[in-house]
Amino acid sequence: MKRVQIAIITAMLGALLVGQCAANDELLKRYVNEALLQNLQIEMSRSDVEIARRDRDAAASAFYPTAGFDYRHTRVNREISLDIPLNIPGFEAGSVLSKSWQWQAAFSGRVPLYLGGRLRHNLGLRDAVLKGSEIGVDIDERDVALQVIQGYLDLKMALALEVVQGAALETAKEHQRSVQAMLDQGMVSLRELKRAEAVTAEAESELIAAGNAAQRARRAFNYVLNRDLETEVDASAEPQWGGEYDLAEAIEKAVQARPELAALQQRLLAGNKQIDLARSDYYPNFSLAAEGGWRDGDIMAMGGRDYWQVSVLAGLTLFDATREDKIAAARASRRREGLLLESTRKRIELQVTDSYLRLVDARKQLSASEREVSAAEEAQRVAELQFEQGVVNQVTYLDAEFALISAGVRNEQARFKVWKAEAALRHAAGYPLP
């Protein structure tokens, strides 16, 4: 690795070991729970559930009778034919002009007896939509949990890198001072000093970039939790997974546990109900209606009277050109939902397989980086002995230290990569996250 790259990354291992002292995932669980309570996307999903529940209740209410009260107060101005002649100037014989106020009060009710299954199918459709909305909340909660874990790991890495850049800058300055001293003694060339100065300048720039990256990671993490973006974050915890996974078992669990598939099953059921609802237009409908009340009389009734009536209403649509189109559209929609279900199942299987292979690869890289650290430790130990014996100069000794630091940093980066890969696999396979 070039000296500039080595100077960019340094004492991350020591910074991260501090976090290992508090190695538990209780803090992660608190962060996930906080996000589940406050995340805006989940709040919107819960609102969708409330809307679907109200729609379902409205569909269920159609099974019950409807009742109403009506009151009318009417001004009547009309001619009334009479059976007796009137010899009154200005009026025609056999009629009289009636001018009066009339009022009527009535109660009415209606009970559906049979509507071709329309009410039952509509209620089944709303039930499926409601269950799908509830499953949608589970989907969003799992996605938010993954976002919290990934955001936390990104922040933890960014904070560690910020510490690294500070230590790297100090190491680079120490290296530059050593080279300057050796140049004053004529032990190295001016070229070595200029190279050390370049490393120091690069380390200063990288420290600024690392600080900005840590701020962005903190804001992104707080955004997921719906906090103030500048809230400080405790990043001392570590995920406690490290399990062994079988690909076939993970795929089988994903097919059984992923809420996306359950939601699509509800959509498929809703498609079936939509077909039944469209076909109900072919069946007759029957309802029972009743009305009764009191109204005042007119000149013909010669007084007020009570009244009531009970009716059985029957109807049958003989011809509707849109019925077949509605049924065909509902069947096409159901077929689309079936294809989407199958496509999603295959996509989930691919996602689990890809996540599994990424985890396997990440663990292999971690194993290789651990061997690299062991080799770098041995090289540093030899360089230190040679420096104490005067066999090598301080520049060579510091280069060995840089190499060890770089190997330790790559090892920690590989460990973070394993954590993120395992989180992705657990999410894809339906395993619980903190």
Image (cartoon, rainbow, N blue to C red):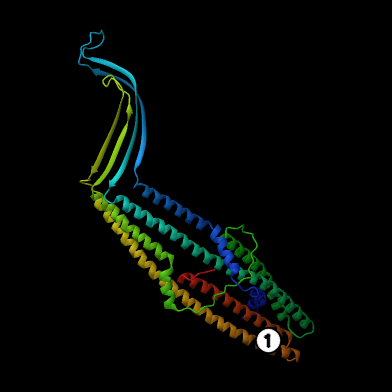
**Residue bearing mark 1:** 380
**Residue 279 picture location, percent across and down:** 26, 53
Q: Is residue 279 left or right of residue 382?
A: left
Which of these two is toward me, 66 or 180?
66
Point out the image quarter for the C terminus: bottom right
- Identify residue type, mark 1: Gln
- Using the rendered image of the protein, determine whether residue 107 is visible from the camera's viewpoint: yes
Q: How many marks?
A: 1
Q: Is residue 249 left or right of residue 81?
A: right
**Vertically, is 333 above or below 346?**
above
Q: Position of residue 11 (x, y in %)?
A: 67, 77
Residue 97: x, y in percent? 28, 16
Residue 2 visible within the image: no
* Residue that extends furthest to the front in the rendered view of this protein: 306
Pick the front one: 363 or 195: 363
Residue at image coords 43%, 72%: 253
Image point 41% across, 77% down: which residue? 248
Give the quarter of the figure containing the N terminus: bottom right
Q: Nearer the viewer, residue 10 or 146?
A: 146
Secondary structure of residue under mark 1: helix
Indicate the quadrant where residue 106 lies.
Answer: top left
